[in-house]
Image: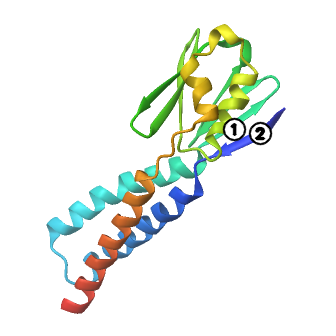
Amino acid sequence: MYQNVYRIRRSFLFPFFADFILLFFLLLLSYFLVGSKLERILLTAIFIPVLYVLFESSFRMVQTGDQGIMIRKFMRKKELRWEDITHLGALILRKRVYLLLTTVKGFYILSNTYEKFSTLVSDVVAHMDNEKVEEEVRRQIEHPAKNRSDIIMTWFTAMVLAGIIIIKLFTS
């Protein structure tokens, strides 16, 4: 049975959901107020991937327990037993951290976009043999890298979309 649940940070999901709502409102404005055909096509082309990323981020979850780890994504689920994981590594790119779980059947990646990422890392390390864990992974438990650029970018996007909506409403 799985005891610990880790989800994508709410501090990212909330502004991303605001972006989605603002983009949807802008799409409606382009269809029902003045909007060119090209504008509708571009907004629809942007809206569809944003919708998918919103669903993917909302449903993404990692659960750990005594038997193993379960990685859930939108309409997918993968369960790994602790003994099936052959190596645990970390890749750090600026403030982004990727935890790499290597198994005999492939590899899986967990990023620091999850809430309580250092707790997740320590939970995984606690179930692994010492020789399977890289030293960089252990450093992430003590000194986790905080990535706030995604949150800042989603809030900035929300402000830009709100500005476009205001301009569109008052110039029509």
Which quarter shows the N terminus?
top right
Give amino acid for label 1: Thr
Q: From what the image shows, is residue 74 above or below residue 33?
A: above
Task: Please give left or right for residue 8 compared with residue 168 in the image.
Answer: right
Q: Is 138 on the left or on the right of 126, as rendered?
A: left
- What label does residue 4 carry, if any? 2
* Residue shown at 58% from the left, 31% from the top: 140
Residue 166 shows in the view: yes
Image position, residue 30 (x, y; %): 25, 76
Q: Which mark is residue 119?
A: 1
Residue appearing at x 77%, y 39% in the figure: 4
Q: Looking at numbered disc 2 in the image, what kind of residue is underneath it?
A: Asn
Question: Closer to the camera, 115 or 5?
Answer: 115
Above or below: residue 96 compared with residue 105:
below
| Residues marked 2 and 1 touching at CB (< 8 Å) | yes
Badge 1: residue crowd in 10 Å (few <14, some 14–19, many ≥20): some
Mark 2 element type:
strand
